[in-house]
């Protein structure tokens, strides 16, 4: 009944025929149900309460108890439940923004490498504030013989699996002719769960059985360096952004010209936005336009320290949702106008440092306040990068502010 009805609150005894209350709670703790439990029992032994606390049970009523006690307990459950729902929504929103930002970083690196004759090291150096390329290990999965017409069905199955078994885990993917490349951080057993899923997946219309191979990489830099050399020979490359397919084409003329205009905008030259507008008029592919815009503004934000990465993350989410070509061009043009007219209010302090001080001031009472928390959930940057930059700018560590 609990599995069918998904109640918010379950009031249960401990000793019952068939299945005891503690066994019931233990079984349900392995599901994705979000339940507040109240244990009502005549057994006051502490061991029962201690066992229940392992599974997050906060409320334990001893018989005999009156109606008022039960109602007060349910009211408290309601408050706890509301608080937990709010925290989960905030956490999901932060993850959604972070995931969108990092997907844009990876797709921008791919786009830069394919469409520009620039050394790989130069490319990733422009994105190091967002991702750790050097010290976090990854696992890469090759899925062979996957036909393009079956890719949407595969991604739908992958999405369902990830939501249930890999929550808060970012899966990156690139598809080229009949081959999908999936990669994920090699932590917490996530790659092993993914490997088991890939072994048993079957597609109804697939002519040839899928085959999977996985390779370990000690860092993201090595992984990207290898796969980019392999995929750049293909004329059409598809990036998997949060289980959605986006295509990359080789628009070298547009990219080289708009990169030049960006450089002139960063140097403070006037009148460049009109030229950007003319260039945007010649682009008719929405996927390419989104990739081009995300790449450009990620770089512009990294070069202009007084701009907020949090605001950029929110803007990139809106960009990804917009599919009307005219609206897309208007959004991008307005963003260029914002950059071209921006004047730093305080050149002596970088925006990153200002944001850290502001966040600390606002959350000073939070006992769990750390630089890692600020970097990942507020700045959407790599914590090592933030730590080094902060020390360089302030001549002291975060702990001493």
Image (cartoon, grey):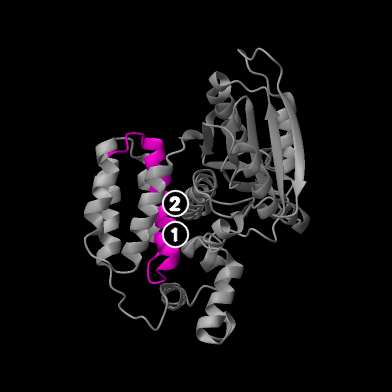
Task: Decide whether the magenta segment is chiefly helix, strand or loop.
Answer: helix
Q: In which quarter of the image is residue 18?
A: top right
Q: Nearer the viewer, residue 23 or 248?
A: 248
**In this rendering, would 42 be left or right of 326?**
right
Residue 286 shows up from this direction = yes
Q: Which mark is residue 189?
A: none
**In this rendering, would 234 be left or right of 97?**
right
Above-or-below relation of 313 to 213: below
Q: Which of 343 and 19 is in front in this view?
A: 343
Above-or-below relation of 19 to 388: above
Q: Nearer the viewer, residue 205 or 3?
A: 205
Q: What percent of the width, then of the height, locates residue 238?
A: 52, 34
Please, what secondary structure does the residue beneath circle 2 have? helix
- Please give the count of numbered marks on the rendered protein: 2
Residue at (55, 66) in percent of width and height? 373
Q: Is residue 7 magenta?
A: no
Report the quarter where the N terminus lies. top right
| Magenta-highlighted residues | 282-310
Q: What percent of the width, then of the height, locates residue 60?
A: 63, 53
Above-or-below relation of 287 to 93: above
Q: In which quarter of the image is residue 209?
A: top right
Residue 369 shows up from this direction = no
Q: Does the magenta stretch include residue 288?
A: yes
CA distance for labels 1 and 2: 6 Å
Q: Do the residues labelled 1 and 2 touch (CB within 8 Å)?
A: yes
Q: Which mark is residue 299?
A: 1
Q: Which mark is residue 295?
A: 2
């Amino acid at each position: 009944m609990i599995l069918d009805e998904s109640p918010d609150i379950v009031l249960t005894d401990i000793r019952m025929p068939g299945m005891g209350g503690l066994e019931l709670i233990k079984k349900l703790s392995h599901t994705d149900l979000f339940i507040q439990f109240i244990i009502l029992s005549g057994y006051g032994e502490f061991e029962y309460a201690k066992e229940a606390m392992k599974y997050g049970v906060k409320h334990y009523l001893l018989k005999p108890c009156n109606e008022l006690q039960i109602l007060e307990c349910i009211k408290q459950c309601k408050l706890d439940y509301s608080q937990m729902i709010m925290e989960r929504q905030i956490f999901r929103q932060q993850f959604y923004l972070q995931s969108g930002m990092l997907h844009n970083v990876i797709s921008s690196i791919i786009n830069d490498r394919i469409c520009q004759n620039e050394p790989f090291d130069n490319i990733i150096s422009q994105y190091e504030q967002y991702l750790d390329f050097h010290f976090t290990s990854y696992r890469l999965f090759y899925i062979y013989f996957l036909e393009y017409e079956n890719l949407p069905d595969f991604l739908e199955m992958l999405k369902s699996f990830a939501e249930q078994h890999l929550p808060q885990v970012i899966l990156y993917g690139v598809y080229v002719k009949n081959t999908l490349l999936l990669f994920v951080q090699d932590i917490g057993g996530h790659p092993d769960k993914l490997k088991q899923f890939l072994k048993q997946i079957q597609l109804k219309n697939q002519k040839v059985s899928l085959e999977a191979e996985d390779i370990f990489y000690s860092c993201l830099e090595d992984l990207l360096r290898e796969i980019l050399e392999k995929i750049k020979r293909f004329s059409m490359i598809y990036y998997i952004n949060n289980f959605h397919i986006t295509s990359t084409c080789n628009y070298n003329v547009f990219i080289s010209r708009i990169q030049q205009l960006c450089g002139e905008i960063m140097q403070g030259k006037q009148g460049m936005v009109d030229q950007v507008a003319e260039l945007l008029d010649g682009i008719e592919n929405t996927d390419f336009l989104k990739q081009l815009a995300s790449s450009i503004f990620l770089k512009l934000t990294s070069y202009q320290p007084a701009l907020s990465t949090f605001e950029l993350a929110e803007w990139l989410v809106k960009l990804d949702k917009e599919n009307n070509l005219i609206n897309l061009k208007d959004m991008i043009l307005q963003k260029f106008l914002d950059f071209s007219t921006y004047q730093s209010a305080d050149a002596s302090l970088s925006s990153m440092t200002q944001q850290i001080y502001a966040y600390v001031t606002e959350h000073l009472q939070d006992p769990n306040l750390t630089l890692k928390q600020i970097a990942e959930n507020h700045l959407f940057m790599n914590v090592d990068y933030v730590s080094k930059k902060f020390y360089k700018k302030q001549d002291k560590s975060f702990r001493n502010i």
